[in-house]
Image (cartoon, rainbow, N blue to C red):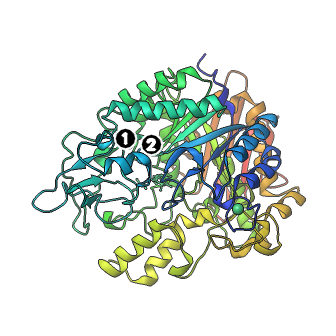
Amino acid sequence: MILNKWWQNAVVYQVYPASYQDSNGDGIGDLPGITKRLDYIKKLGVDIVWLSPIYKSPQVDNGYDISDYRAINPDFGNMEDFDKLLSKAHKLGLKIMMDLVVNHTSDEHKWFQESRKGKDNPYRDYYIWRDGKDGKAPNNWGSFFTGPAWKYDEQTGQYYLHLFAPQQPDLNWENKNVRHSVYDMMNWWADKGVDGFRMDVINYISKPEGLPDVKKAPDELYGNPEPVVANGHRIHEFLQEMNQNVMSKHKMVTVGEAPAVTTDEAKKYSNLDGKELDMVFQFEHVGLDSNSNPALGRWSDKKTSLTDLRENLTKWQTALAGKAWNSLYWNNHDQPRVVSRFGDDSTEEKRVLSAKMLATMLHFQQGTPFVFEGEEIGMTNAYFDKLSDYVDLDSINAYHQIVDEQHLLDGKTMLKYMGMHSRDNARTPMQWDDSNNAGFSDGTPWEHINKQYKEINVKKALTDPDSIFYYYQKIIKLRHELPVMVDGSYALVKDNQNDPDVYAYTRKDNDTTLLVVLNYTDKKLKRHFDVPEDAKILISNYADSQGDTLRPYEAKVYQF
Ligand code: TEU
Ligand code: CA
């Protein structure tokens, strides 16, 4: 039997530490704040808590720039606070998954400080240094945060590679010492008792030989290195080595963040043989609304059609079935809020209905679901209206490049696109109640609170039995109780597979069938599905079922 792993019927909840709960009034969420809220997380019913990076960091990229892998960022607390968090989580039966950021470090990491000192420094080869070409960067790669992917360092007259910000130099995984330093650090955390890792852009760590130039679209200032750095030629060797040195020695769960991963690659990374990772985050379903102009990347106002979404989700369900394991997600700290993106937050009623419909769509698929903080209460996009509201370097850099430098869009259009796609949408503080600063902090929050906090908050959700929160709680409980949600095979309903408005699929095992019916629109529709007379409605976002009539955003799951 392939379904025998403890994390296969688990649900993960992601906490973005800076935005969860501030405990000391400095406006920044922290570890004691998270510890205080673990009972709430437990109440939701999840099994694993993934913490975005809490390590020591200058916070150029909110902790995805680590200067010490074995220390806690002072804004978040100290190691004692972490130990308390871990021990309370374990007492509650919650596992802790750490973020592992090892494609790059901060430029303030001791390794990089040494590395930049001289060509013969023992740490020189920990990073990727090259001579320039004709007075320019070694190749034409661009950084994912705009500008070139290379920075010239005067001290030694060479350039170093940084796929992200210049303060995030890429580690050189060709160097065995780098790899083993990382494995030692992972084992150190595992020995401390952490239960797994979410691995940041882990499929970027094997760079192509010779670091060749890449193709450039007409409007692009630099080439996009993703096609050559993602899924590089040594990636599976590195992950198998990591697995032998770390994962195989502990009971842990791993999920690799893997942009540009295909289903064929995913079958290798997350194969059920367990030689590499347990799952990967693929990016296809969250890329369907990207701009058709590569120079604009994801900045667009395109809406994802149900046809595209269904086709993509189905592709992943089908390709990995019986071979590898899917992760299932709508949201994380890099993505806009699902209810604003694929759902409808134009009225309170539609917000609640569509949030539940989308939860149903995702959680009844095969894989391990991830819920991002605030998703369980239907938090919406931030709806910032001016550039000065934004704090994420990714959005701010993109605005300057696209509007001021390249004049590809006017400021108003870019702000509209940012309203839909900025990472800040996910990072506004958690809305706990309707008091000052939404109960997040007594001080000035590091990022603006979403203006809707008086209507959308945890306190309100917990007093309303029909809230999105209780719907998530129910769906999570069902996953723990109903084997078919975990092991059942997935199929589209034949007569409905091209329906532009309604998504219907089944999950089936030896004794149970689930039929999931989802109205993706705000219209009342009629659709007929054949179900046995004694079929029961397992869960729905409406109080009753009206047979063939589907009300706006109606979701229902038949069980027979
Ligand atoms: O994100 C990587 C990421 O978002 C990629 O999708 C990348 O931006 C894309 O390929 C560019 O087109 C992770 C973290 O989740 C994010 O918060 C960090 O900023 C980033 O890595 C760097 O560590
Ligand atoms: Ca704080």
Hey, which quadrant is residue 258 in on the image? Answer: top left
Element at label 2: loop
Q: CA distance from mark 1 to mark 2?
A: 8 Å
Instruction: Pick the residue in front: 277 or 524.
Output: 277
* Circle number at residue 118: none
- Coordinates of residue 370 in the picture (x, y in percent): 63, 45
- Residue picked out by circle 2: 102
Instruction: Pick the residue in front: 454 or 420.
Output: 454
Hey, which quadrant is residue 134 in on the image? Answer: bottom left
Residue at point 64% right, 37% down? 506
Q: Is residue 278 left or right of residue 437?
A: left
> Please, is residue 60 above or below residue 180 in the view?
below
- Residue picked out by circle 1: 205
Residue at point 34% right, 81% down? 404
Q: Amino acid at mark 1?
A: Ile
- Coordinates of residue 537 in the picture (x, y in percent): 80, 42
